[in-house]
Image (cartoon, coloured by chain):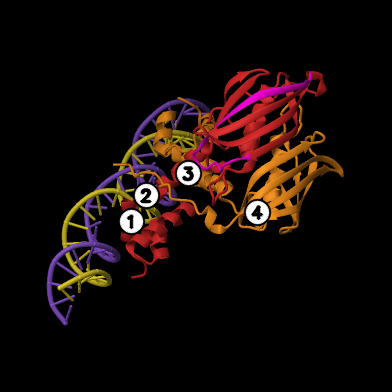
Chain colours: A orange, B red, C purple, D yellow
Amino acid sequence: MRLSKEARRAALQAYLRENPFVTDEALAEHFGVSVQTIRLDRAALGIPEMRDRVRAVAERLFQNVTSLAEEEFIGTLVALELDRRAASTLTITPVHTFRRSRIARGHVLFAQANALAIAVAPAPAALTRRAEIDYLAPVTLGDTVEAVATVVERPKPNRRVVRVEGAVGGKPVFTGVFRVALLRAEEFTGEAEGMGRAHRR
Amino acid sequence: MRLSKEARRAALQAYLRENPFVTDEALAEHFGVSVQTIRLDRAALGIPEMRDRVRAVAERLFQNVTSLAEEEFIGTLVALELDRRAASTLTITPVHTFRRSRIARGHVLFAQANALAIAVAPAPAALTRRAEIDYLAPVTLGDTVEAVATVVERPKPNRRVVRVEGAVGGKPVFTGVFRVALLRAEEFTGEAEGMGRAHRR
DNA sequence: GGCGAATTTAGCACCAGGTCATAAGCGGCG
DNA sequence: CGCCGCTTATGACCTGGTGCTAAATTCGCC
């Protein structure tokens, strides 16, 4: 016997984790068993068919990319008065930190602040034109950063200057100033790009 | 006629850009035409069938499962002379952009620049203390950003001022100045990070 | 209103990659 | 030997298509 049933099933799980988009036929060949056996294994393990696996991956990942404006946010929006102020919180998890020092990476806090500056902008979309950020104290694993953005200047109808301050337990950890440009809806209607090419057969 | 052929095809392209996972049948219903007409339209526009669209999305995004924040180094390090200069490239994929505008989010470019500033620092780890970044032109989906970091000042033995310039096809898209603090190993419980190794993408 | 061309719809055969159910083969072992 | 666990085979059916042909409809134009 090439592999015991249990061993094969364990291997199958592992293999599919790494290569989610293989057909039963390819799996059968890979494990030296028949397609039917693979199907039995999948059924026993509750693994859906390839098309469903592909679709699940695609949908989950597409959601990340395509999520609505409020989900594009880094951190959790806790207050928003358009064109006035906004606030968010972000709890630092291991994915946000340098592995060894457990200090949050600069760009994570920048992202929280930048997202907040864009969220407070009274427009369907906004672009950052300039940012200055001062890191006052390191933020470490487990900290919850409370950030507050305040519109401090409106130099032109479509420009805003936003000050963002971040604190952990009341102690300031960063401050930043973001100059953003407001966009009207028609300024970001992208152009086609083709979905790819047909193939097969 | 509900919509002229050309109008329908344009609408179809746009619709599929936002909803890539729709079957021909759903499209036919949506546009009030027969499934066959949708197929003709897809053929004329070179749009592959739904399964292929799903698959393309899934495969393209699968490599990026590691969310932005999880990556050690944002971009691919292509050159490094410690305490002098460093360079990286970053190709903008959908995960880096706003969904509708397809413009790279500010924090993505910040992250590339910041990672580079930290990588060039001659220390096992470094922290950003202050950053200024100017966005000169929008960076869009598919662009490859070439960033170069240069150490421009060494105000103290453990401080560096790094200028980072980003360009797409030779055209500047951002410039930034990062002031970083070098850390000695004993300044945190652990060791290096920041010396980021290149990540494939 | 009539006509030809463009456009749309329909029908049929076929394919991949499955589902589900049923049946048959095989190896080991008590 | 017979039975059990496992594997394999078979056939009917499903979805979301491709490719082709042919018919029906609609448009532009005289």
Q: Do labels 2 and 1 touch, CB within 8 Å?
A: yes
User: In the current view of this chain or complex, which residue is farthest to the front?
Assistant: A155
Q: Tell me where residue D9 appears, x and y as whole percent.
A: 33, 38
Give the SS element for disc 2: loop
Q: Chain of mark 1?
A: B
Q: Nearer the viewer, mark 2 or mark 3?
A: 2
* Residue that mark 3 sits on: B57
Q: Is A96 left, or right, of B168 in this rendering? A: right
Counting labels gives 4
Q: Earlier in the sequence, mark 2 or mark 1?
A: 1
Q: Residue at x 80, y 24 (%)?
A: B188
Q: What's the residue type where badge 4 is placed?
A: Glu
Q: Is residue D26 above or below residue B92?
A: below
How far apart are the two marked residues, 1 and 4, measured between alpha carbons? 34 Å
* Residue that mark 1 sits on: B41
Q: Which class describes the residues within 10 Å of circle 1: few (<14), some (14-19), or many (20+)?
A: some
Question: Which of these two is toward me, A34 or A135?
Answer: A135
How far apart are the two marked residues, 4 and 3, measured between alpha carbons? 23 Å
* Residue that mark 4 sits on: A70
Q: What's the residue type where badge 3 is placed?
A: Val
Q: Chain of mark 3?
A: B
- Evaluate whether residue A160 shows in this view: yes
Residue B47 is tagged as 2
How far apart are the two marked residues, 2 and 4, measured between alpha carbons? 31 Å
Q: What's the residue type where badge 2 is placed?
A: Ile
Whether callout 2 and callout 1 share a subunit is answered yes
Q: Chain of mark 2?
A: B
